[in-house]
Each structure stands twice: as C-alpha cells, then as structure tokens.
Image (tube, grey):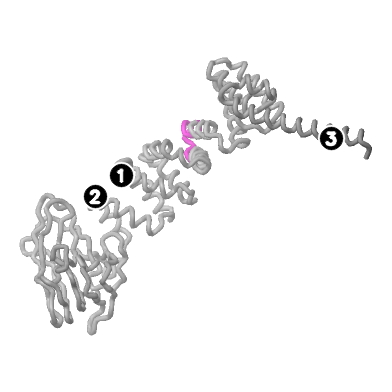
Amino acid sequence: MSQRMRVVWMVGVFMLVLLAGWRIVGLMRTEALAEQDPPAALRWRPDAPAALQVLAERQLAAGDLEAAAATARRILAQSPLHGPAFRILAEVAERHDDPAQAERLYQIAARRAPRDAVSRLWLARHALQRGQFDEALQQLDRLLRFSPQRAAVVFPALIQMATQPAFADALARQLAHDPPWRGSLLAALQRPASGNPEAAGRVLEALQAQGGLQPEEYARWLDALLAQGRWGEAYARWASRVPKPDGRLPLLYNGDFAMPPTNVGFDWRIQRVPGVLLDFVPVAGARGQAAYFSFLDRRIPEAGLSHPLLLAPGHYQITLKARATALRSELGLQWQLVCADPAGVLARSDPLDGNFGWTRFVLDVEVPATGCPGQWLRLVNPVPNGAAQRLSGELWVTDVTVRPGLNAH
C-alpha cells in the first residue's frame, strides 16, 4: 500500500471512530438530558424515544392534549412498538371522554409495555368499576410480578375490598394460581397492625373451599386467630375439619396420642427443646400411645409439649397417667394450665420426680368468667432460669383427659 493510500485509509478509520464516538457521546448526552431537559436532548437526537416520552408526559401534565398526542405519534412513527406512547394517547382519549378508545389504547400499551404501571392500574380500576374482579386481579397480578415494591400500595386496597364476598372469592381464585406475592398478601391479611380479620376470614375460607389452602397456611391461620384472642372462631374452624374417631370431640383432643400430633389448631403442639428427646411409643394394654421424654441433663425450662383448650367458665378436672425412671430435677416437673390472657396460671399438678410406676395425676381447675378466653396445658420445669433447671431421666405420659367437675356451668 502506497504512502498516500495509507494516509487515506487512516483518515477513513479515524473518521469512522470519530463518528462512532460522537454518536456514543450523543446517546449518553441524550439519556442524561432526557429526564431533565427533553428539548436539549432532542437537539442531540431528534428522534430519541425517551426524551420524546418525557416531553409528551409534560405536555399531558400541562393540559396540552393536542401537543401530547402529536408527540406520542412522533414516537410511534420511529418506534411503532413503544408502549408508553400508546398510554399517552389513551390518556388523551380518556380526557376527551372517549372511554372505549381509551380502553383499547390502554390494552395496547399494556401488551407493548408489560411493566407500565399506569396502564395496568387503569385497566384494573376500569375492570373493578364494571365488577369484573377476575380481570382486575389479573392486571394487578402482572403489576405485582413486574413491580413487587408496589405491594405497599396495592395490598391495602386488596385487603379493604376483600371484605366483600364476591371480591374475596375472586382473590382466592387468583391466589390459587400461586402467584409470587401470595405469601406476602396472606401475611398482610392476618397481620394485627395492617390486616383485616373479616377480609382474612373470607379469603382464607374461600381458598379452603376451593381446595387451594395449603396445610401450613391453614395452621398459620388458626395460630393468627389465637394470637388475636379469637379462640372461639379458631376452634370452630378447626373443629369443622378435624377427624372425630368417636363421632364427637372431647374437651381435650387426642389425649391418648392415638393419632400423631399435628401441631395444628386444638391438637398437641410439639416444640423442639435442646436437651429433650420426645417420641410416641406404644403402651401395653392400651389402644393409644404414650409421649416418651428423655431428658439429657441440661437446663430445660419446659418439655416442649403443650395443648390449647377452649374451656368455658366453670370447674374442671384434668387427669393423666405418667411413670418415670430416674427423673431428676430441683422441684420436679409440673403440668400447668395457663390462661391465654391476664388470669395467669389456673392449676398445677403435683411434682413428677424420681422413680414411679403408672400413677394418676389430677388437676382441679376453676376457669374464671373473665380474662381467660382460652387456655394452654403445658409440661414445665417450675425452677427459675439458672443451673437449677438441669433435668435428667425418663418420663412417659398418656391418657390425658378433661372432664367437667361437679360445679361446672
């Protein structure tokens, strides 16, 4: 290649690099100016969709509908698939009192720009106004999938509307598809500060009726009702679904451990406690089983076995059978019946300690008329926290029953 040709080639390459660099600078300058100064951005790149979109938004906000529509069409002439431009045209049509055209354009905007929150919210609101709850929730589902942070605004509205049975049913149908926001909404429905017990009940009941309520969600629902002090409602919902081996429910369910404890509702609750091994083993000559505890000589505040009860005001007798081998503790283990509210401990059993064969233990209980909407039966170590809480040995418990006493109401 001659010297002259080499110079021409180098100049050509330089010009191409310069042009490419200038274009990059222009694009960067356009992006930087698009939000702050659209006209300046358009001087760098007259067909920049981002700058034109901001300009159209400002024109719309200023009430210059014709200019906004013209800018939107200018965008579409360059980028026919630009969804936000269709949304500008939709807003112009709405302000011109043409709802049919507005809906058509919003539909196009949502298809072309699935993340466009304004279009999704408009379509959801429009569907709600017509009573098309399923369609509205489909729009909100897409919005929450693309913009999870909008749950802070959407969830309170959903919770409020879910007090209406028809909307609660539709919301349950949407939740049955297991959207990614399902767990967060169910938690918000049941949260004491932000939730709504009526809405939560309707939605969860609808989910349950449709077969879409997961076992863990059902358990959390009942626990939330207990935490809210709504023990009667929790019991009614649990009792309607629980197996009844003898056709009826005793005051204390599954007292012989014939069925594996479920940790749900008004069945036995098992909590893992370090230093305690808990199992359920057969009992000779009995149809049920015994709860078997092995205590590993560690500080143990409670055994990890409890049972919620819904006892009306009155007198009751709680009985159980237990035996122990080398059970050693400072004060012996103790069964306690404790109110869920301020009334506190209602009854304590005699200490369980040392070595003994099958023995019947009895707790006489008087449930007060106030301050005790529900109760917990627990096996605890009554020693205050410290080295004296060490517990070792073995314990078997079975045949736990609650019966009304002579003075029961």
Q: Residues within 10 Å of mark 1 (few under 14, many from 20)?
A: some
* Circle 3 residue: 10
Q: Position of residue 380 (x, y in %)?
A: 17, 66
Q: Main secondary structure of the magenta part?
A: helix
Q: Indicate whether 237 appears above or below 321.
A: above
Q: Residue 266: in sight, yes or no?
A: yes
Q: Closer to the N terminus: mark 2 or mark 1?
A: 1
Q: Position of residue 358 (x, y in %)?
A: 15, 81
Residues drawn in magenta: 126-133
Q: Secondary structure at mark 3?
A: helix
Q: Residues within 10 Å of mark 3 (few under 14, many from 20)?
A: few
Amino acid, disc 3: Met
Is 380 left or right of 46, judged from the image as shown? left
* Circle 2 residue: 230
* Circle 1 residue: 197
Is 382 left or right of 130, judged from the image as shown? left
The label on residue 92 is none
Q: Secondary structure at mark 2?
A: loop
Q: Closer to the N terminus: mark 3 or mark 2?
A: 3
